Image (tube, grey):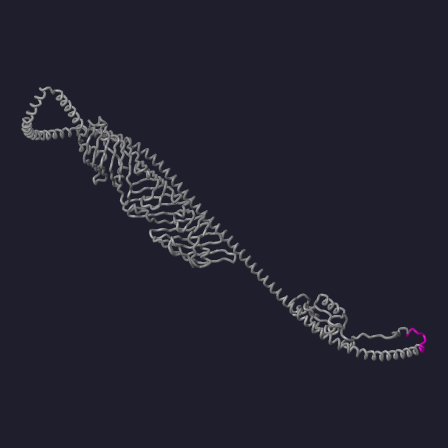
Amino acid sequence: MDRRTVLTKTAKGLMEVTGKTSLLSREQRNVLSQVDGKATVGDIHQRLDKFSEHKLLDMLAKLSRDGFAREFVSAPTSISPPSQVPIVHEGPELDFSNVASSPPRAMQAAAERAEADEVARQVAAARAKSEADAKAAEAHARREAEQRAERKRREEEERLRREREDEERIRRELEDRIRIAEEAAQREAEARRRREAEERARREAEERARQEAKERARQEAEERARREAEERAWREAEERAQQEAEKRARREVAERAEHEAQEKVRRAAEEQERAEAAKRAREEEKARAKAEAEAAARTRREERAREKAEAEERTQVRAREEEKTRAEVAARLEAIKSGRAGRLKRLLATGAVAALVAAVVVAQFLPLDTAFYERLATRKLGTPVKIGGGELSILPSPKVKFRDVVIGKNGAVKIAAIAASPEIGSLFGDTRVLKGIELKGVSAQPEALAGVLWGRLSGQDLVFDRVHAANVKLALPGVALPDLEITATLGPGGSLERLVAATAEKRLVARIAPQPGRASVEIAAKDLQGTLGLKLSVENFSARAVALPGELQLGQFDGKLLDGILEGRGTLRWGAEWTFEGDVEVRQLDMTRIAPAVFSSGSLEGRGRVYAKARSGEALLGAPRVEGNFVVQRGQLSTVDLARVLQTGASAAGATTFNEVTGQVISGPERVQLRNLRLLAGPLTASGSVDLASSDGISGRVAVEMNTPAGVRRGNLNLSGSISKLQAGR
């Protein structure tokens, strides 16, 4: 490459100059911009005079090596500026360096002139030759230039065509690469955004899970603290109650000792008074007996007069009958005389046996003096007793029987039949000792039950220690209780020691131990469904309670409910109104039995406060009010697919499997309210509230959120329809 060389840009150089690439420095790009396929290297040097010729040639050579430019053609001599045409030396060079060293100056001058002439001649000859050669060369060059120009034009056209094709191909390739790069960059950006969204969603989910775990841990800690506080309070209450019971027991022991001492004094006084009363009673009885004897004598005299009249009449009748039978006797005597005496003996023996049997039969069912037994029972029970009738049977063992017995001023207790085994010796004295009293067909009012539990028997002239009653009906207002079988055991002092009441087949058993002013109660039931209007079946129910006048304090009860566990405590009161108030806890309840149309699986746990109030016991637990918290774990909603509803916006049949559902419940007679609901189901969460009407209608609003690869999807869903046909949609 020299100063006459002409360079042109390649496609790579065009892309660099047009700014589509940026591979060169600014200085190199400025030099490349001067390359146009016309200017020589010398022309470029004149334009860029700040570069030295050597530096410019190096830069152009590097651009050519790197493929940004290439040599196009070498320019003829006429194209380059005259100052740049190299001088062609013909013949020997003229060297005047030794002239000064020549010693003789004249000779030196002559030699110089001769040499100058020779040089001039040579120069003239050379110029002439050069001009001739130049003219010939110019003509030849002109011809060659024309040919070369023609070839150059064709080559230039071909080159330009190839360059255009190359540039078009390169442009297309560049556009394709740019498009591919842009698409790759877009895909990478989308993937990066997606990864960032997923990472953000994961972090949010982790943060939300952490917050939820933290909140759940806080709630569990609070709940645990509350339970511990309740249990501590309950233990403290039990300890206080135990201490109070011990104090009360000690006090009762002291009071009992004092009472027994007083009772001993009182009994002594009563014995003395009773002796005096007995003496007065005997005197009164004697007087009354005398009066009764006199009255009986008068009655007997009247009766004898009447009987005499009747006897006279009967005598006349018998006389007539005797007249009639004398003939028969005469005939029989004739028969005896005729040898039939054996038959007469048999007739006499048969008559004697018949008379004996008749005497025993008459003695088997002797009438009782019911008025005497009424007085004994009235003094014993301390309330009026009326007996409709009674009798004494001897065989196979002595037994007294009473019927249509009414106890109390207002008929609080009615007994269809009473049977008892008396001691034989007591039948002939003033005191009756009865064993094994059996009652049948008993109906009793509530006040009678209170009298049985806390009343005290008195009187020593009627003694018994055990009573068994069958077919007992307790007429509690508004409560349809089944018939009961009751066994009561009495102590030596006449007070009730133990009472056991049971239904048929022992499905419900209550054991009662009366105490002063109260009674301890133990209840065991195989199934409580229907009791006090209870609609759900509570199996294997047991409870410990304290009965007071008008209320039953359930210290603890438990049972099996819907394949789960029911526990609690509370107080049942009755009177003008029936009320129940208490705390209830349930565990492991089967949701498919609570709401089979909504849940296909799930286990419920919860605790809350229960309050019920009604005018009758039977309606008491028909619609109680409940307030509490609950959690349903590892279940499935069988009527709606929340994820599909969130995606489509319309109700979608299907199922939603969840980890847990938590919330609060407030239920009343007409509506059940579920508040602060929260459902966790993997990437899907939901929260809201639901109202359930007694008519099976359902309404509510739920906010649903779901993490997806494309981001977080949110939506609000409205719940409608019924429990059996749930509808969900936006």
Tell which of 217 and 528 is nearer to you.
Answer: 528
Residue 409 vertical position relative to residue 22 in the rendered view, above or below? above
User: Quadrant of the rendered structure where residue 728 is?
Assistant: bottom left
Instruction: Please tell me which residue is depicted at 71% across the width and 69% down the height of the picture.
Output: 69
Q: Is 626 positioned to the left or the right of 348 in the image?
A: right
Q: Position of residue 611 (x, y in %)?
A: 34, 48
Quadrant in which the C terminus appears: bottom left
Residue 449 vertical position relative to residue 596 in the rendered view, above or below? above
Q: Position of residue 94 (x, y in %)?
A: 88, 75
User: Quadrant of the rendered structure where residue 135 is?
Assistant: bottom right
Q: Position of residue 442 (x, y in %)?
A: 24, 38
Residue 515 vertical position relative to residue 142 in the rendered view, above or below? above
Quadrant in which the N terminus appears: bottom right
Tell which of 25 and 715 is nearer to you.
Answer: 715
User: Quadrant of the rendered structure where residue 89 is?
Assistant: bottom right
Q: Is 46 positioned to the left or the right of 268 in the image?
A: right
Q: Is 653 positioned to the left or the right of 132 in the image?
A: left
Number of numbered callouts drawn: 0
Q: Position of residue 163 (x, y in %)?
A: 68, 70
- The verdict on residue 100 being magenta is yes
- The verdict on residue 285 being magenta is no
State the predominant SS element of the stretch in magenta.
loop
Q: Which residues are magenta?
A: 99-107
Q: Is 565 positioned to the left or the right of 327 in the image?
A: right
